[in-house]
Image (cartoon, grey):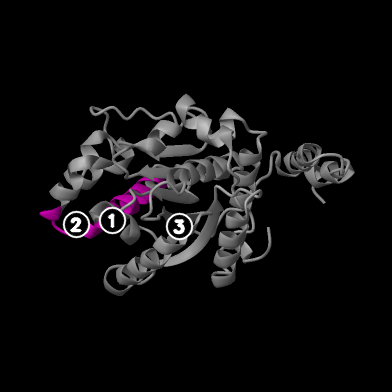
Amino acid sequence: MAIADEVADVLPAAGGDTPLAQQVALDARRRARLHGQQLPTPPETRVLTIANQKGGVGKTTTTVNMAAALAQSGLHVLVIDIDPQGNASTALGIDHRSEVPSIYDVLVEGRPMHEVVQSCPDVERLLCAPATIDLAGAEIELVSLVARESRLLRAVDAYLKHRDAQGEPRLDYVLVDCPPSLGLLTVNAFVAAREVFIPIQCEYYALEGLSQLLKNVQLIQAHLNPALHVSTILLTMYDGRTRLSADVAGQVREHFPELVLRTGIPRSVRISEAPSHGQTVMTYDPGSSGALSYLEAAKELAVRAVDGGDA
């Protein structure tokens, strides 16, 4: 048994005094188990597209916090921000002013990705290829380019080979943050990835968009990337006080029992506050329920890749 598990086991169990006391005790045990965890490395670099065409479901929040959680647990991670809003770049504290070399230059100008990748200032082993406002026009500019759907795929493959040639550590995870649409930017992300990671908000409208997203994934499979598949679903913005959250979570788990992570991400003020400080919740408030939930979700994601077993 790991030392962290031994410490967690000797902590007092959640008492029945008040819900707050129960939550405090539970979080203390979670912190003891998750502190300093080292996650297993996948057998090869996993490239995941974080996608959901519905806005406001926590795509960017999930991308940056899962990336930070994986990196804090000993893995090498790259975030590719292809959303013109650049919110993932902001949350990771990455400079993405219009004059900064960005993923726009990679997709449209053919610039090597290693020239635009920056290190996250707050999390070791976490890298980011930022988005700038120039990316807003990329949808139009890509239309006339050769092999427009696979430009990100080629750029990622070339970057992985460059790292290998330079003797740099192999990337364990590449997470691509998509805009909430199925334009050429998102198509590029689907073609570059082997896995689709879907965050689903625990509200009714989220279910309506899921079926259309799955149809779009099937279209990409049929015509552009046969290896693409939905590997992971994460329930976000879960509010245990409402029946709606429980109903939505139950329906998603019933229909996709093998894909949904056991860990759900609660509604959290700390998660919402973190980007305004140019941070993820993992560094802004590492002891919060939101940060602990993302650490647990990262552990599930990593362990599933290695042995398919329980985290």
Q: Is residue 180 above or below residue 271?
A: below
Q: Position of residue 36 (x, y in %)?
A: 69, 39
Give the left or right position of residue 253, taking residue 133 as reference. Answer: right
Q: Within the magenta stretch, is there residue 91?
A: no
- Write down the residue under mark 3: 206
Contact (Cβ within 8 Å) of mark 2 with mark 1? yes
Quarter of image, res 218:
bottom left
**Region of the chain picked out in magenta, as a range:** 143-164
Q: Alpha-carbon distance for marks 3 and 1?
A: 23 Å
Q: Alpha-carbon distance for marks 2 and 1?
A: 8 Å
Closer to the observer: label 2 or label 3? 3
Considering the image in quadrants, where does the C terminus appear?
bottom right
Structural crowding at the residue carrying mark 3, measured as other residues with C-alpha within 10 Å and reported as few (<14), some (14–19) or many (≥20): some
Which amino acid, mark 1? Asn
First of labels 2, 1 by sequence position: 2
- Write down the residue under mark 2: 148
Quarter of image, res 34:
top right
Which amino acid, mark 2? Arg
First of labels 2, 3 by sequence position: 2
